[in-house]
Amino acid sequence: NVYDVKTDSRGILWLAASMEDSTSLPMSMPVLLKYEGHDFEIVSRFDEPYTALLIDSNDVVWAANAIDICRYAKDTTACYVAGIINNSIAIDKNGFLWSSDGYRFDGESFVAAPGRENLFNGMDFPSQMAIDQHNNKWFVTFQSGVWKFDGETWTNFTAQDGLASNKVFCVAVDRQNHKWFGTDAGISELIDSESTQIQEQGNAVKVNLYPVPVYDQMFISLSELQEPVSFQLYDIYGHVLCSFQIDIDGTSFDMRKYCPGAYIVVIKTATGQSFRKQVVKIGQ
């Protein structure tokens, strides 16, 4: 079982995994593996499976599990207690390592961030974290939505603020510093403190694409729309394959010339609303 994979500056592949231990009774043995192009080498063994890896600017490998975080450098492993659940780790602009459990490594041990108790609402637990371009820490939880920590103040974002759901599994920050949250009810994007759910029905325009999956003609119907919108089709690598205007009555689009696979449809209004949906093209 491989839980996470990272590559260091030398091109060496590091894997957090567990494997069968054939030295005694068959059992799962958590390991840190290194791959340099020939064979997988076990460089460290652990007591618990490590599900998240991070490689810092010095090519030091950090591995996190539910109990502690281990540091592997120059054939030496050191482990530190860091909260009770660590599904992800990240390094801020000041070089400090953070865990998704709200702990920061001060060079000798992990210490709790001031106000860390905000992450635990009843039986709630944080699931992942990310750090944005302004050094804000974003923690996502299974019950209480999203928490932002700017170093002093904690701010909570929930479904009342536009989040798709308070049950959030993952978070990512893109190059425009937009925050993306994966929930059990879809994806939400946070732009300038305004959360907008990406869904099939926006506040002012409803879009329906059918059939899905599609073989030849894809039909696009619009409602509650007073102006034309732009249509763009992207491949999974972000390349624009075609672009045109749709009038308020909708239209159809011929997909026969495209290879089977996944594509992204983006429809935008003149007022800035956007609708995105993945469609699957199938062969005959």
Image (cartoon, rainbow, N blue to C red):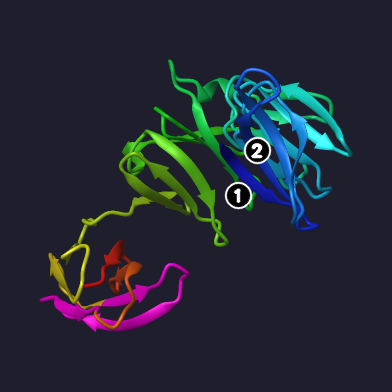
Q: CA distance from mark 2 to mark 1?
A: 25 Å
Instruction: Give the amino acid at mark 1.
Output: Asp
Q: Is residue 284 magenta?
A: no
For the question of whether residue 136 can be seen, the reply is: no
Q: Residues within 10 Å of mark 1 (few under 14, many from 20)?
A: some
Residue at the image point whose x is 32% and y is 54% from the top: 198
For the question of whether residue 60 can be seen, the reply is: yes
Q: Is residue 61 above or below residue 154?
A: below
Question: In the picture provided, is 174 more to the left or to the right than 122?
Answer: right
Front residue (pair 92, 57): 57
Highlighted magenta segment, given as a residue range: 230-255
Quarter location, residue 185: top left
Residue picked out by circle 2: 16
Tag 1 or tag 2, which sits nearer the N-term? 2
Instruction: Give the amino acid at mark 2.
Output: Ala
Question: In the picture provided, is 191 more to the left or to the right than 163?
Answer: right
Q: Report x, y in % for residue 257.
A: 28, 83
For the stretch drawn in magenta, what is the main secondary structure?
strand
Disc sitting over residue 132 in the figure: 1
The secondary element bearing badge 2 is classed as strand
Q: Quadrant for the N terminus, please.
A: top right
Q: Is residue 131 above or below residue 268?
A: above
Q: Report x, y in % for residue 138.
A: 55, 40
Residue at the image point whose x is 16% and y is 65% from the top: 210
Q: Report x, y in % for residue 10.
A: 80, 57
Front residue (pair 214, 110): 214
Quarter location, residue 33: top right
